[in-house]
Image (tube, rainbow, N blue to C red):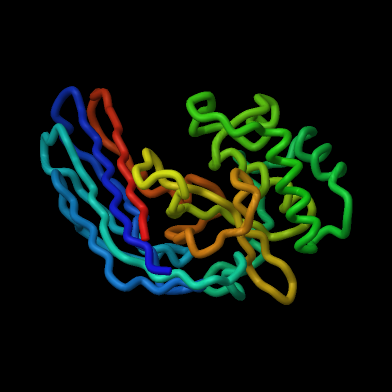
Amino acid sequence: MILSIQHTTRYTYDSPVPYALQQLRVTPQSRGGQNVQDWNVLVKGGDRILGFDDQHGNAVDLIAFHHNTTEITVQCEGRVEVNQTNGVAGQHEGLVPIWVYLRSNDVTKAGARVRKLVSGVDGARGTIEWLHSLSTAIRSAVRYKTGGSEVGWTAEQALDAGHGVCQDHSHVFISCCRHAGLPARYISGYLMMNDRVEQDATHAWAEAHIDGLGWVGFDVSNGISPDTRYVRVATGLDYTEAAPVSGTRFGDTKESLSVQVQVQQ
């Protein structure tokens, strides 16, 4: 399946920004069952000053804002061919050793709620069946609800609240996997929805590393492994390492963000 994607991110500020840098992780790569046919990134209000691959193999663009700008827009557009792999992204590659994905941090550190959730999942840990059961248990414990969570929530906070979005589902899944001794990582990307083309956000899911298969994806929010409707863009230990846009700025300005995403065949 060939997916056509348009993704626009716009930041506006209530006063001129004297200096700011942003890292963009918005460029998919040809690996894990997908082939990028064409992809373009256009930045208005800033300049691309550097491009590099980070420790996870993500393509990163470093953007410097124009001096005293009040708006910056990042427009991405392209086509990606996606093959059916039943969620299997393949064997581990890159500079980061696999054991790094066992390491928890402030976002994914397992507390009492994560430990209890893991202990309640039946089956042999590390199998496909167990991971799907884990995904189901998380979806029951953390109801999908937009607008009710914070970007900085930890896995424990999402479980405590009992609701969240795809980012929260992914963090809880990663935390549970690492607590169970399985390497896991965060994925940001795109999902073609069956009921609409227009979306107001990118998507997120998680991957666990299974002996003999490699990295396998699990979209807790939708209760499936990724299929030909999914495009992988960036990976990381958690959201902060795979976010489409991150950065820093000087000045005491208020920021407004709007996102428009279109994914269609």
Q: Quadrant of residue 259?
A: top left
Q: Nearer the viewer, residue 139 or 43?
A: 139
Question: Which residue: 65% across, 48% down?
Answer: 223
Q: In the orientation shown, which residue stands out farthest toward the front?
A: 195
The location of residue 237, given as percent across then percent down, is 56, 53
Question: Which residue: 56% across, 29% down?
Answer: 145
Check the image and report above or below for 175 versus 94.
Answer: above
In the drawing, does residue 8 fall left or right of residue 211? left
Q: Nearer the viewer, residue 212 or 218?
A: 218
The location of residue 69, given as percent across then percent down, is 12, 36
Which image quarter is the N terminus in? bottom left
In the drawing, does residue 44 fall left or right of residue 138? left
Question: Which residue: 49% across, 33% down?
Answer: 151
Q: Count how many numbered circles sit on residues in the image.
A: 0
Which image quarter is the C terminus in? bottom left
Q: Quadrant of residue 185?
A: bottom right
The location of residue 236, given as percent across then percent down, is 52, 55
Question: Which residue: 79% across, 62% down?
Answer: 126
Q: Nearer the viewer, residue 54 or 194?
A: 194
In the drawing, does residue 62 fall left or right of residue 155? left
In the drawing, does residue 102 fall left or right of residue 31? right
Check the image and report above or below for 263 versus 157.
Answer: below
